[in-house]
Image (cartoon, grey):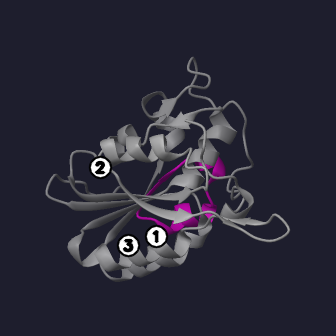
């Protein structure tokens, strides 16, 4: 069932930046233009807030990326990359994204989760139970099937590749590489933070 989208709807967008970065890189050998992504998913509705959850490294080499997000009107929530003895790394914003979405939900009609991470299914169910329209935007090739099924609507960002991707094979909207459908990309703890712009 298609969802109703009208210009008076108050929209909040919550972007799992690591998930989008790694999905675009793995599927298309490209990067995401997050400003264009926000424009596409808002779809002429009233944007209340767009928040990107990002990881900060000790070197600070990701600062130009953070500045570009802010310049595009996207707030950033920053967390330091944790490096454990033995070399293990943790770069996870899932709980922070969930808490922010729940906190902001009374001010919104629509929540858009920009992630393919199946861990967000309980959030989708909670927000829908409380009367919000919940949309998910992600690359289908790296999106958990349960997340697609739980959302009121799903936007496959692969279909918007020519609009939202930077670099990579631009002559075709087909992915450069494919992941098994419904397969969750590597967990945030297994991924490197975004440092190439």
The residue beneath circle 2 is: 42
Foreground pick, 9 / 21: 21
Q: Is residue 147 magenta?
A: yes
| Residue 145 coordinates in the image, percent (x, y) | 62, 61
- In the rendered structure, which segment of residues is drawn in magenta? 136-152
Q: Note whether 60 is above or below 26 in the view shown.
A: below
Q: Is residue 33 magenta?
A: no
Badges 1 and 3: C-beta atoms under 8 Å apart? Answer: yes
Q: Quadrant of the N terminus?
A: bottom left
Residue at left offset 70%, top offset 62%:
187
The residue beneath circle 1 is: 97
The first of marks 3 and 2 along the sequence is: 2
Judge from the rendering whether residue 178 lies leftward or rightward of residue 91; answer left or right: right
The residue beneath circle 3 is: 101
| Residue 183 coordinates in the image, percent (x, y) | 71, 56
Please tell me whether mark 2 sits on a helix, a strand or a loop.
Answer: helix
Please tell me whether mark 1 sits on a helix, a strand or a loop.
Answer: helix
Q: CA distance from mark 1 to mark 3?
A: 6 Å
The first of marks 2 and 1 along the sequence is: 2
| Residue 48 coordinates in the image, percent (x, y) | 22, 60
Q: Residues within 10 Å of mark 3 (few under 14, many from 20)?
A: many
Foreground pick, 68 / 175: 68
Residue at left offset 74%, top offset 60%:
190
Q: CA distance from mark 2 to mark 1?
A: 18 Å
Q: Note whether 22 is above or below 148 in the view shown.
A: above
């Amino acid at each position: 069932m298609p969802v109703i989208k009208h210009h008076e709807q108050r929209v909040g967008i919550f972007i799992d930046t690591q998930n989008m970065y790694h999905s675009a890189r793995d599927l298309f050998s490209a990067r995401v233009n997050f400003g264009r992504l926000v424009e596409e998913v808002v779809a002429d509705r009233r944007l209340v807030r767009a928040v990107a959850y990002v990881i900060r490294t000790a070197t600070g080499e990701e600062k130009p990326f953070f500045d570009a997000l802010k310049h595009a009107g996207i707030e950033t929530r920053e967390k330091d990359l944790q490096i454990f003895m033995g070399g293990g790394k943790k770069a996870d914003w899932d709980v922070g994204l969930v808490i922010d979405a729940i906190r902001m939900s009374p001010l919104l009609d629509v929540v858009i989760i920009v992630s393919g991470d199946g861990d967000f299914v309980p959030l989708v169910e909670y927000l829908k139970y409380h009367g919000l329209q919940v949309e998910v935007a992600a690359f289908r090739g790296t999106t958990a099937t349960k997340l697609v099924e739980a959302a009121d609507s799903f936007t496959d960002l692969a279909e918007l590749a020519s609009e939202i991707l930077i670099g990579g094979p631009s002559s075709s909207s087909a992915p450069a590489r494919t992941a098994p459908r419904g397969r969750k990309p590597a967990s945030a703890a297994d991924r490197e933070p975004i440092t190439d712009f």
